[in-house]
Amino acid sequence: MSPTYIAVIILCGVALMACIAFVIQDIENKKRERKLRLISLKSGIRRASHLLDAFPPILMTTEIRSLLCKYLEARWTAVVELDSSESNKQQRATFQAQAAILPEPVAHPSGSMTIFKSHTEAARAMGIIKELAQFITDIKNKGEINHDIADNLTKGAKQTYARIEVDVELLNAMETEKSRGPEVVIHHYRSCFSKLQNLNYHQTLDRQLYEIRTHVGQLAEKIDTAAEEKAKEKAEEKDSGKKFNF
C-alpha cells in the first residue's frame, strides 16, 4: 500500500469523523434550541395565564379576554408541536375547555359606590392592570400583535387604571365621612362623580354613577336638615334672650 493511498484513507477518516462531529453538534444545538423554545413558550403561558386568572372579573372586557386566550392558544399549539407529550396535550385540552366557557358579565355591586371593598383589593387590581399594559407592550415590540390593536388595548388599560384610582378616592372619602361627617366630604364625592362621568365612554359606569349620585343626594339632605336645625336653635336662643332681656 503506497504512502499516497494511506494518506487518502487517513484524510477520508478525518473527514468522516468531522462530519459525524458536525452532525452530533447540530443535533445537540437543535435540542438546545428546542428546549429553550419550550422554556420561552411556557414562560409566556404562565404570564398570560396569571393575567387571565387574576384579572378582576368586573373589569374584564371581551377584548382583553380574547387577546389572552388567543395568545395562550397559539403558545399551547406551539408547545404540543415541539413536545407532543400527554402532559402537554392534557394541559392544552384543559385550557381549551376553560376558554370555551364564556363568563357571565359581572354587574356593579348593588348599593355600593365602589367596585372594590378595600384599598388592598384596589391596589391588587392596579398591579394587574400595570402587568397587562407591560404584557401588551412586550408582545407589540415582538411583532406578535397588530400595533393599532395594541394601542387601543393600552388606552383601555389606562382608562381602567384611572377608574380604579377613582375607586381609591371613593374609599378614602367613605373613611373621611365616618370620622368627620358629610360636610367635609361631599365635595370629594362630587369630584369622583365628575371623573367617572368623563370615563363613562360606553355607559358601563352608569350603575356606579347612580350609586354615587344617590349617596350625594342623601348627604345633601342631611347637611340641609342639620343647617335648618342649627338655624332654628339659634333663632330659639335669640328669642329666649329677648324674652329675658339678655
Image (cartoon, rainbow, N blue to C red):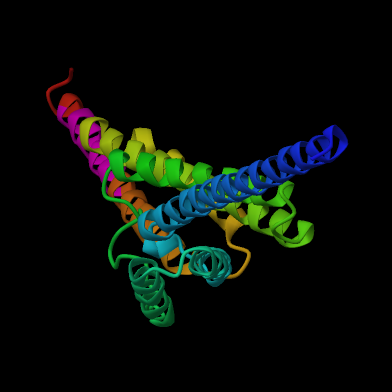
User: Looking at the figure, which quarter contains the C terminus?
Assistant: top left
Closest to the observer, 109 or 56: 56
- Residue 182 visible in this rendered orientation of the protein: no
Residue 224, position as x, y percentages in the image: 33, 47
Write down the quadrant of residue 113 in the picture: bottom left
Is 58 on the left or on the right of 190, as rendered? Answer: left
Residue 51, position as x, y percentages in the image: 44, 54
Closest to the observer, 193 or 59: 59
User: Looking at the figure, which quarter contains the N terminus?
Assistant: top right
Residue 181, position as x, y percentages in the image: 26, 36
Tell me which secondary structure the magenta stretch mostly adopts: helix
Q: Is residue 105 above or below residue 30?
A: below
Residue at the farthest front position: 1
In magenta segment, residue 63: no
Residue 79, position as x, y percentages in the image: 50, 63
> Which portion, as a residue range, is magenta?
225-240
